Amino acid sequence: MTISRRNFIYSSTLSLAALASAFPAHAGTANKDVKWNETCSLLIIGTGFAGLGAALESHYLGMKDILVVEKMPSAGGNSIINGGAIAAAGTDMQAKAKIKDNPDLLYSDILRAGGGIAHANLARRIADESVSNYEWLRDEIGVKFKAVTFHGGHSVPRSHAVQENTGAGFINPMLAKCKEFGIKIQLRTIVDDLMVNDKGCVVGVKARINYRNDRPDSGKTIYIRATKGVLIASGGFSQNVQMRTSHDPRLTKEFTSTNHPGATGEMIQEAQLVGANTIHMDWIQLGPWTSPDETGFGLAPLAVEPMVGYGPMINPKTSKRFIQETGNRKVRADAIVAIGAPCIIYTNETNFMNKVVGKNMRKEQFEAAMKKGVIRKFDDLKALADFYKLDYATLEKENQIFNGYMKNKKDPEFNCMFFDDGVPNEKGPFYAIRLWPRVHHTMGGLEINENAQVLNVKGQPIAGLYAAGETTGGVHGMVRLGTVAVADCIIFGRIAARTANKWGGC
């Protein structure tokens, strides 16, 4: 007998024989053997970093009949629109740039940012496999890397940026490889139920094909059998206001999100209904580098992250600095929200052109951001102060103090990190960006072990069910360091494939 997840959660108190009468057919239950419309080996839900990483790893392991389903009309999810860099510790690119790094340092950074609640076994896997994962992407998948950049909260520059400066630089080569290998990717297919057999194994799903995201009830129901199990790689719940306010009541609809519209977290809920445990659900990260002068993820983050440490962040109410510019995302986002108004970050033209344009942002992206008013250019500090209605005398003094810190490479006020190639902001032109946080990443999700198996509420693996990426919790703890999520997604997607490949079914 195969039963749906709605039945399975009651199986501890009801006999299987009683299920047919206990739940009506219209509730989505299956009280008799399911007639499968399709059979695959590993069924992967989601076409982002984790899902495509798992699909490609499965192919390299020799797995046949891999199926990837995606509820949206196009592939890539949040991954294709992200900032386009991945964390790796101890690479050849770092060595060439004379950056000393190693997995132990990355591991300690993840744990420190995580505030003591990150799961060490998961962080260790990411740190230890970060270099081999970077090399796999470069050598096997064809991802083109161009530079190593710094992101707030890391000890050293270790974010390896792709040529495209967006996640498309990863996703498009991964999609091309999937096409080359004949891996089936089925769009507009939403999963409604995880199907569990009488032994407690997840053996497939109930889904709808021809689904439209703007019509929640659309699509034709089918049943897909998965002989190697089901991998949930469907992302987080940043766009689900009800779900996020359930865990953090502050994050109402007044806070927009950087995420694509499909980041609604229903697969986390479906897994819960077959007994999966969730952890860290109230740790929801705001991106401190988004601008109120554009929507979604936008272009501002591509400029802001390489600007930190090269110019001050200014409170518009006081015209003074207020936080560690190179601090992690939570430190900065919380400080901006506490002010209650967008803050300003700026630096001089030399720093901006050396670190941003051509390095972390393409010329056409820079020009688009300038045209939209996301990035603004000012001839001098007085013009900048006048435009943002700052007190010029206060700002001028604050700028001088910051320049002194830059020259001494030491900030006794906020402990900002400074870099050897930084030029003090003594003369213009200056480039400035307004900042206001958006909901960006949900650190909580399904609990997994180091083999990417989903754990139930008793800490035991649910047979045939795997998860990777933002749909999981525990990896990052309180704060996710920039670009570590890309490594997390791909590494654990690949680990899930290896675990599924060894599973004999039940």
Image (cartoon, grey):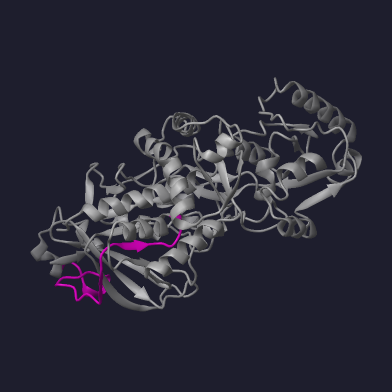
Looking at the rendering, in which quadrant would you find the C terminus?
A: bottom left
Residue 124 spot, x, y in % from top left: 38, 35
Which quadrant would residue 389 be assigned to in this image? top right
Given residues 63 and 114, the one toward you in this image is: 63
In percent of the image, x 47 and y 46: which residue is there?
A: 134
Question: Residue 42 lies in magenta, yes or no?
Answer: yes
Residue 402 visible in the displayed image: yes
Count of numbered circles on the image:
0
Which quarter shows the N terminus?
bottom left
Q: Is residue 209 above or below residue 146?
A: below
| Image vertical order of residue 417 relative to residue 373, above or below | above
Residue 330 seen anywhere in this rendered image of the structure: no
How far from the left and from the top, in percent, is residue 234? Answer: 41, 59
In the depicted structure, whether residue 11 falls above or below residue 430: below
Q: Nearer the viewer, residue 358 or 167?
A: 358
**Residue 208 screen position, x and y as percent:** 35, 74
Is 227 within the magenta?
A: no
Q: Which residues are magenta?
A: 22-49
Front-lying residue, 90 or 492:
90
Q: Main secondary structure of the magenta part?
A: loop
Horizontal side of residue 367 vs 37, given as left or right: right
The image position of residue 126, as x and y in percent, is 41, 40
- Identify which residue is drawn at 67% across, 28% down: 416
Residue at image location 42% in from the left, 69% down from the top: 179
**Is 250 positioned to the left or the right of 407 in the image?**
left
Q: Is residue 422 left or right of residue 62?
A: right
Residue at the spot x=47%, y=42% of the render?
283
